[in-house]
Image: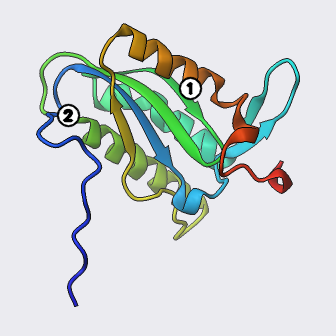
Amino acid sequence: MERPVRKSPRLKNYDYSSCGAYSLTICAHHHQHLFGRIQFDPCGNTIELSDLGLIIQSTLEGLSIRYPDFEIIKYAIMPNHVHILVIKHGVGSSSVSNVVCALKSLATKEIRLKHPGMKVWKESFHDHIIRNERDLIRHWDYIDQNINNWAKDRFFVKDLM
């Protein structure tokens, strides 16, 4: 039996190795709350990262060594997803997909040392090509405020607080 052909979520005919800014969202497998817990506070919510979240944070912060043409300018680790704003500088064959694949692979390898066989990531990722400064500011603010809007998220579960 043939598997169905999956439609690519990437923009057709766009070169994701070209210079520019990108907003990325990578979700946990089945949107599970694996990466941490939100601590609700009227002055501003914070996230208490789980051991998996700490591994993801460490991996994210080390990606620029592996991919020096990519600069992570902002990120937020949420209970069930990660937001990243990245800028591709210079010319190189590395693409946004290479960076996401490396993040997923390196973090999963480290996580499975403590949690063998655990499925960490949802297949694929969501991307948005930043078109101008206003678009960049909009995505920056969205990432910045995501933690304070957590209770409005469709995958928010009160019992997991």
Residue located 13% across and 26% down the image: 92
Taking the image as drawn, is residue 31 in sight? yes
Which x, y percent locates residue 136? 41, 15
- Is residue 139 positioned above or below 29 on the image? above
The quadrant where residue 152 appears: top right
- Is residue 49 positioned above or below 87 on the image? below
Which x, y percent locates residue 18? 16, 25
- Is residue 39 positioned above or below 33 on the image? above
Residue 9 is left or right of residue 104, and the answer is: left
Residue 25 is left or right of residue 102, and the answer is: right
Name which residue type carries label 1: Ile
User: Of all residues shown, which one is farthest toward the top?
Assistant: 133
Quarter of the image where the N terminus is located: bottom left
Q: Alpha-carbon distance for marks 1 and 2?
A: 21 Å
Residue located 52% across and 70% down the image: 117
Taking the image as drawn, is residue 113 in sight? no
Residue located 47% across and 12% down the image: 137
Q: Tell me the SS state at disc 2.
A: loop
Q: Tell me the SS state at disc 1.
A: helix
Residue located 56% across and 26% down the image: 143
Give neighbour class at mark 1: few <14, some 14-19, many 20+ (Cα, 10 Å): many
The quadrant where residue 41 appears: top right
Name which residue type carries label 2: Tyr
Which residue is disc 2 drawn over? Answer: 16
Of 2 and 94, nearer the camera is 2
Which residue is disc 1 drawn over? Answer: 143
